[in-house]
Amino acid sequence: MESLSTNKSYGGVQGVYKHASTSTGTDMTFAVYVPPHEAGQKLPVIWYLSGLTCTHANVMEKGEYRRVCAELGLIFVAPDTSPRGEGVADDPQAAYDFGLGAGFYVNATQAPFAQHYRMRDYIERELPELIAREFPADMTRQGIMGHSMGGHGALTIGLRNPDIYRAVSAFSPIVAPSQVPWGQKALGGYLGGDKAAWRTYDAVALIEDGARVPELLVDQGSADDFVETELRPELLAHACAKAGIALDLAIDEGYDHSYYFISTFMEKHLRWHEARLV
């Protein structure tokens, strides 16, 4: 692991790091905030998965999480959203919703993406192993959250691994990618036309197929331009109600899809996670 930058903030350290990933076959960059803590102390970990077009830097620069993480003693990890570098396949149309910056947290099976787009393995296995080795992380106390495409990632990873993540939340998530244009394009491109293979990467489908967590927290802006066509929070509400999952779905009046929205409700989500990681 190579340290690219470190800055003191609220008594802790905001760092940016790079390493050679065996999952993606590329160098991967990620950000970690470690709050002030005693020597030898192990701290709970919050994973934040970003949305389309983002890198680790978007939430690091605009998410406004460090003050609360310092107060609560939370490590905050922000990975990238896709593999990058020479030889990594991209959308030939250079579209923002597929290819670089749009890995959708899947293990691709279709050429030419299967070689590098293995973000599921990277987030679920490889990067946690690195965090456990290199940082004062208590891996028995993990929560996961994300925004938009990253909200999809947080929900699906949390539902597939309820024994690992004690708390799962999302900001304006894509809850049913199999049923919306963003998801249909991505899942079809990465996984092929067999829609049965898509279900493990679809939160609503996972719940329909028996995946369970005790509760979920979701914030959704009412002025979000994507809510009706791409996000469809009502589908998650219906699936959770049928499955008996306690869903706290807040429709936040006047908020859009931006980091102005995310930063407003970041403290709420961090405090919700901390209460479940004690």
Image (cartoon, grey):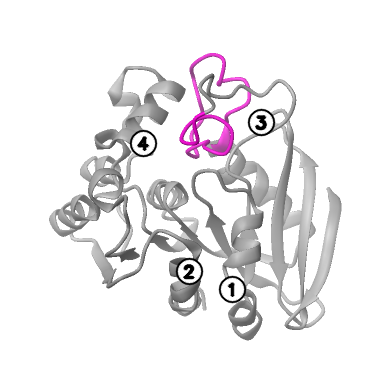
Q: How far from the left and from the top, in percent, is residue 33?
A: 70, 67
Residue 182's label in the rendered image is 4
Neighbor class of circle 3 (other Cα within 10 Å; few <14, some 14-19, many 20+) is: many
Q: Which residue is mark 1?
A: 64
Of 19 and 54, which appears nearest the observer? 54
In the rendered structure, does residue 53 fall within the stretch colored magenta? no
Q: Residue furthest bottom?
A: 71
Neighbor class of circle 2 (other Cα within 10 Å; few <14, some 14-19, many 20+) is: few
- Quick check: can you spot residue 144? yes
Residue 204's label in the rendered image is none
Taking 23 as reference, is 73 above or below it? below
Q: CA distance from mark 2 to mark 3?
A: 32 Å
Of 90 and 155, which appears nearest the observer? 90
In the rendered structure, does residue 115 fall within the stretch colored magenta? yes
Q: CA distance from mark 1 to mark 2?
A: 10 Å
Q: Residue at x 41, y 30 (%)?
A: 186
Of the residues tagged 2 and 4, which is closer to the observer? 2
Asked which secondary structure carries label 2, the reply is helix
The answer to whether residue 175 is left or right of residue 278 is left
- Quick check: can you spot residue 273? no
Neighbor class of circle 1 (other Cα within 10 Å; few <14, some 14-19, many 20+) is: some
Q: Which residue is mark 3?
A: 24
Of 225 and 60, which appears nearest the observer? 225
> The magenta stretch spans which residues?
95-119
Of pointers 2 and 3, the one earlier in the residue sequence: 3
Of the residues tagged 1 and 2, which is closer to the observer? 2
Q: Amino acid at mark 1?
A: Glu
Q: CA distance from mark 3 to mark 4?
A: 22 Å
Q: Which residue is mark 2?
A: 260
Q: Residue at x 51, y 22 (%)?
A: 93
